[in-house]
Amino acid sequence: MAQDLVCGMAVDEKTPVATVQYKDQTYYFCSQHCKEKFKEHPEKYVERQASDRVHHH
Ligand SMILES: [Zn+2]
């Protein structure tokens, strides 16, 4: 399962509702709404995912 970086939901990459190509990666989203939010600030969501692996608040 892939993860929707906007809302955190698990998304089946075989039947995604929405996908975005960003920096040679495919990102999967549960809805067009999450896709549009990602496209507004993709770097914010990608960075947050990377930093979540290291930091716990
Ligand atoms: Zn979502």
Image: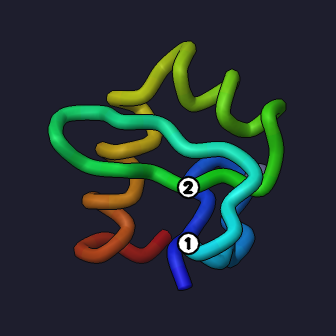
On screen, residue 56 versus residue 25, left or right, reads: right
Residue 9 spot, x, y in % from top left = 73, 70
Is disc 1 surrounded by few (<14), some (14 to 19) or many (20+) residues within 10 Å?
A: some
| Tag 1 secondary structure | loop
From the image, which quarter does the N terminus lie in?
A: bottom right
Camera-nearest residue between 21 and 37 = 21
User: In the figure, residue 49 lies in which quadrant?
Assistant: bottom left
| Crowd around label 2: few <14 · some 14–19 · many ≥20 (10 Å) | many
Residue drawn where x is 74% and y is 38% of the image: 34
Does 4 appear above or below 45?
A: below
Residue 47 vs residue 4, the one in the foreground: 4
Disc nearer the start of the sequence (2/1): 1
The x and y percentages for residue 31 are 82, 45
**Front label number (2 vs 1):** 1
Q: Amino acid at mark 1?
A: Glu
Q: CA distance from mark 2 to mark 1?
A: 7 Å
Residue plotted at (36% across, 36% down): 21
Residue linked to disc 2: 28
| Residue at 68% from the left image edge and 61% from the top image edge | 16
**What's under tag 2, amino acid-wise?**
Tyr
Which residue lies under the disc numbered 1? Answer: 13
Q: Is mark 1 within 8 Å of ligand 1?
A: no
Mark 2 sits near ligand 1, with its Cβ under 8 Å away: no
Residue at the limit of the structure toward the left, as seen here: 24
Residue 40's x, y, as percent?
Answer: 56, 14
Look at the picture and state if 23 lies above or below 46.
Answer: above
Under circle 2, the secondary element is strand
Labelled pair 2, 1 in contact (Cβ < 8 Å): yes
- Of all residues shown, which one is farthest toward the bottom? 1
Q: Residue at x 41, y 32 (%)?
A: 44
The image's mark for residue 44 is none
Residue at the far top: name it.
40
